[in-house]
Amino acid sequence: MSEPSIFFSEVNRRQGDFNRRAFLLGGITGLGMAALGGRLMLLQVLEAQRYEKLAASNQFNFRLIPPPRGLILDRNGVVLASNRPNFRLMVAREEDTDVEATVANLQRLVALPTDRVPRLVRDIKRAPKKSPVSVMEDLSWEEFSRINVRAPELPGVTADMGEVRVYPFGGAFAHVIGYVAKVNDKDVATVKARGETPDPLLYNPGFRIGRQGVERAFDLDLRGKPGGKKVEVDARGRVVAEDTGGDIPPIPGKEIRLTLDADVQQRALEVFGEDSGAAVVMDCRTGDILCMASAPAFDANRFVRGLTGPEYRALADYERRPLLDKALSGTYPPGSTFKPTTALALLAAGVDPKDRVVCTGGYRYGNRTFRCWKHDGHGPQDMHDAIKNSCDVYFYHMCNRAGIDRIHDTAVKLGFEQTYDLGIQGQSKGLIPSSAWKRATYRKDPTWHLGETLSAAIGQGAVSVNALQLCVSAARIANGRKALMPRLIKSVGGVERPSGAAVPDLPFLPEHLDTVRAGMAAVANDVSGSAYRQSQLGLGDVLMAGKTGSAQVRSFDKAKSRKNVGLPWKLKDHNLFIAFAPFDAPRYALAVIVQHGGLSGALSAAPKAREIMRTVLLKDPEIRARIQTPLPMPEMEPQEVVEGAAPEDPETIAPAAVNRPGTPL
Amino acid sequence: MSTSALSRPGERDRPLIKFIEIDWVFCLLLCLIAGAGGMIMFSVAGGSWTPWAAAHLVRFGLFFLLMIALAMVDLRVWFLAAYPVYIVSLVLLVGVEVAGDVSKGAQRWLSIGPLRFQPSEVMKIGIVLALARFYHSMSAESAHMSWWLLVPVAMIGLPVVLVAHQPDLGTAILIGATGLAIMILAGLSWRLILAGVLAVLVALPPFIMFVIHEYQRKRILTFLNPENDPSGDGYHILQSKIALGAGGFLGKGLGLGTQSQLNYLPEKHTDFIFAALAEELGFVGSVTVLLLYAAVIFMALRTASMSHSHFGRLGAAGVTATFALYVLINGAMVMGMAPVVGVPMPLLSYGGTVMLTVMIGFGLVQSSRVHRYSEVTSGRGSLL
């Protein structure tokens, strides 16, 4: 009762002042408390739902389940690219992670190469907080379990099982299939530049993006759609609990089937050995590419893992250039393998194939002598002989009867100087000179000189082609009817791609083609043909037709020898060979380029072509049936032959058997 | 009855009478707040007494006994101890400057033998005692406006500058604001107050731009725009707000707050324990705790106004001001209304030093209540 109160006591001035002011400050404190209460009201009652969501997005995390990448198969279902399980180690940075110490700890548990440590530490520090950085792949089971046992002491460290791309054939398909590699900033920037949001998969630490060939061109098909797993995580990103009910399964990538045949492709690389070059084989009825090899190859699996600097330099600096796709990207002068094209142009220009030219070993044009490869000359040559012997003088003499533009026109119709819709990138167009090209390219000397036609006619000079074009030309000559288009991708996700045979007819007269084919048959089968000894398949009456080629890569001084012996590799001639078989009923066409082979088309390229062709032919059940079947006796009825050989498909055997005797050489 | 007993000089010195006169409702409120703190610590440790809850409660028990003991200490002893405590604190603060331990980039701790403590905490009591004593022997006119006021200004300014230099901006603000509150309560002229406020407003921007440390400036800027850097400096504020908001009206329940249990909430047992409490106990729980604090502050203020001695009044009010500032600054920080400064929620947060300071202060408050009728003269005769 008598106690002084805040409100009424005025014992003296000091107490009065104190009480009034204590009341005031108490009031201010009260206002402050009320403000806190109001703030709580706002946060906890009015905006509670918003913060509830934020808390949930902290608490729950959708972990990406990466989809398995689609398989790549050959035409028979042999796996060319698949996935294998991979234990990997990742580190995600926290606010207070001592990156150096973490990596040092890891080094004690797993075999982490010391020279990679500084780069790893930098990568982890540069990565955003909580986003895992792949530290090591392919841990052994012991290492994997060691990490998982120690996980509680290693903040931010996780070891899990992912999948990694594997190429069972190593390098055999490296140029066609390409490879996958880590996603870099440029990949993400490219997607963003297109105005799309990058696939969250791109940020997944184990994800690999297609870098070359089929892997790159069909990356989106092969990639699939990621699934999701709802997990509860703590602030350090550790999974506390998994909610299996909320899982969304991933959709695997599409399977891609190529037209290639693994056996043929491998055989092609085998026969190349250490030689550098390319081999392309096509089915000359459908346009399917059975083999497209570039030698030497490289092991695509190394690119998946990531090349070290020295590894990459070794590949890039090697003069035989394993990284270059010599089948599509490399262009080479076709040399004499271009002569069938020139011959067709001559025929189209009305040259009588029976007209003869006497080859004396050289041809004087203007003030220059163009030499035949055979210095003492071939003697009188008609077109058949000229193709068979690869006589240069015949073509020197005749070529301007057709003219460069007709040659150019014929070459384009046969498939040169163009790229094809194979589905993969990296084709070079090559060049077939023409007067229009000369006008557009050489401003100072825009007129085409007739002398220049001489070089072009024998596939030298400005002419350059790639191995695929060469093979297409062989396939079109062999097919004789269709302007075949090459096909590499047989099906994507089970959907068949259009066949290369659904195309317009070739604009050549059949008898012209017959003349050229007969010449090519003589190259390989006439005992005096330029590649007779190297072209014998040894498959009974299944014979090959072909054309050799040898292209100079240096100009000849008068004093210098044209021999290649003792020359540095880079200055040696290219050796080429085109072929098709069986020549009486063509099924397969082939082109082989041996880069700087230094011999001749016959000695260097033809034996390789023969081996590859043998493999292709022996894989064809119809051809096998034909070889294994004894020649039909005149009195035997065809159905008996059919029964013994290929009971599943009698229709296709019969025409081949019937055609055989009457086909002209 | 007790009033009459207290008003009789012979009677009021008896320990039993003093004991009864302690404000037990006030004590109960303190126990409730500390108990709530222990409960939340138990919860955020995943339902474990260790490492925080048990230590917190045991420590509170000991300090509670200390407070009761201090409440029985004659106000005249407090009066005599005032200047020595202040001077010792000041010497210790200088000692920190010279020989303090550096921890987390600031020089705040001093080790003397086995003891390791923050002199800035002792100064919180020292400044209150010293100012109360100074004003006790000062006339109302001088306290209103006179050159004598330079003395308390110096008494406040010295420790503030020393503490701010450690650097410990939170404690410096606390000491300065407490001192200012005592000067106002003692009757400082409103004109001077206004002038002071204007001076501070003018001095603040250059102070922030040039004097304070980079990390402190960053905190202030982050507070002004926390969404700028949600995983860096804005992280604390953002996660604390999420915890509060996610608690909703009734809370997620003890042990069920995801923000605190999964460690998204930083310093969940110390500076941000209020957010952890609000997440698990909701609006109802957090407002209840806020009301407990309000009750403690107003009961302490009322105790202050009851004292017959100016020393008792200003001492109790000074302690109350410190306590209220703790609560308001921490509350505002946790709710995203103030930058992150290292000021805990008193009694609720884990940490012995602040609890000790606060309980010694409340010992002074209770002593001023128990001895509210005692004569505290500026002389020494009556006690010795």
Image: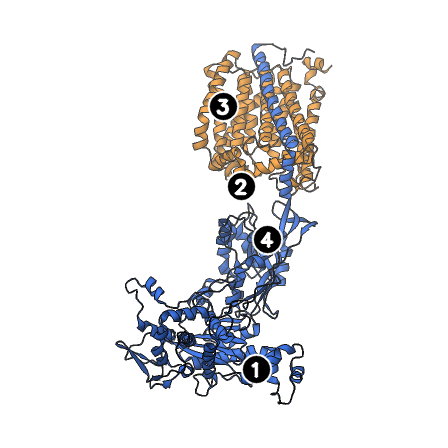
Chain colours: A blue, B orange
Relative to A175, is A146 on the left or the right?
A: right
Residues at marks 3 and 2 on the same chain: yes
Which residue lies under the disc numbered 1?
Answer: A659
Which residue lies under the disc numbered 4?
Answer: A157
Rendered-image quadrant of the N terminus of chain A: top right
Instruction: Using the numbered discs, state the Cα–Cα distance from disc 1 to disc 2 in whole angstroms.
Output: 82 Å
Relative to A313, is A537 on the left or the right?
A: right
Q: For the point 51% across and 76% down, which residue is it?
A: A270
Mark nearest the camera among 3 and 4 is 4
Q: Which chain carries label 4?
A: A
Q: Which mark is residue B232?
A: 2
**Image location (x, y in percent) of residue A115:** 49, 60
Q: Mark 2 lies on which chain?
A: B
Please say whether residue A279 is visible from this viewpoint.
no
Q: For the point 61% across and 84% down, which residue is it?
A: A628
Q: Say whether marks 3 and 2 touch (CB < 8 Å).
A: no
What amino acid is found at the position of numbered circle 3 in the picture?
Answer: Met
Q: Say whether marks 1 and 2 touch (CB < 8 Å).
A: no
**Image location (x, y in percent) of residue B332:** 58, 30
